[in-house]
Amino acid sequence: MGPVLINGLPAHVLLVHVVVVLVPLTALALVVSAVRPSWTRRLGLALPGLALVALLSVPLTTHAGEWLEHHTDSNALVRRHTELGDGLLPWVIALFVVAAALWWLGRGTPSATESVREGARPLSVPVRIAAVVVSVVVAGGAVVQVYRIGESGARAAWHDGYSAKPVSGHRD
């Protein structure tokens, strides 16, 4: 499905950075666009495009992570990280769907400085409130899940991997 090694390194440890940057960035852009409809028009297709790239990066990273899991010693920390990682895709799918819906709804609405074009109507207040609430919930869930996955991955990678005291020959 995707690369498992990049220049001899496990691809997961490199691809994870794409997810860690793009998912929160997409979440932030989504919430700002929901709160400020003028940003939805300014961003245009960039918002759903960013969400699509974030969405595509998740299965690539997960695939590389599953390969890495089969090539390392399994323990409870690795299994926990894997379980949490499997839970990110639904959140990022939701980010993409909400971003696309927000773009779709916002493309026909006039800005505050434009006169209302024929056929274009501003979104009703309940629709705008619903868009903000759904965006905040989806964005928050995605960011929290990325944090939980990252924290569990760091624990899995670094447990027993360093010393609290300097090793011989090195100074603080």
Image (cartoon, helix red, strand yellow):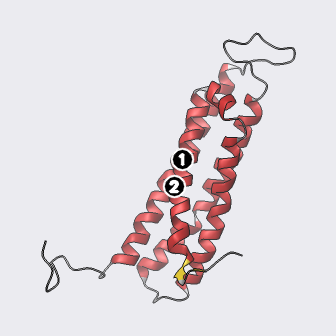
Rendered-image quadrant of the C terminus: bottom left
Horizontal side, residue 108 vs residue 92: left or right: right
- Above-or-below relation of 42 to 4: above
- Answer few, some or many: residues within 10 Å of disc 1's Cα (few below 14, many 20 plus, some between 14 and 19): some
Q: Quadrant of residue 43?
A: top right
User: SS for tag 1?
Assistant: helix
Residue 67 appears in the rendering:
yes
Which three-letter amino acid code belongs to the residue tagged 1?
A: Leu
- Above-or-below relation of 6 to 40: below
Q: Where does label 1 land, which residue?
A: 25
Q: In the displayed orientation, state which residue is furthest to the top.
A: 115
Q: Where does label 2 land, which residue?
A: 21
Q: Position of residue 70 (x, y in %)?
A: 56, 87
Horizontal side, residue 74 vs residue 40: left or right: left
Numbered tag placed on residue 55 in the rendering: none
Residue for point 47% across, 53% down: 144
Which three-letter amino acid code belongs to the residue tagged 2?
A: Val
Residue for point 60% across, 39% down: 30
Rendered-image quadrant of the N terminus: bottom right
Residue for point 74% across, 18% down: 110
Q: In the displayed orientation, state which residue is furthest to the right.
A: 118
- Above-or-below relation of 155 to 109: below
Question: How far separated are the C-alphas under marks 1 and 2?
Answer: 6 Å
Horizontal side, residue 19 vs residue 52: left or right: left
User: SS for tag 2?
Assistant: helix
- Answer few, some or many: residues within 10 Å of disc 2's Cα (few below 14, many 20 plus, some between 14 and 19): few
Q: Position of residue 6 (x, y in %)?
A: 58, 78
In this figure, what is the number of numbered marks? 2
Q: Position of residue 82 (x, y in %)?
A: 52, 74
CB within 8 Å, label 1 to label 2: yes
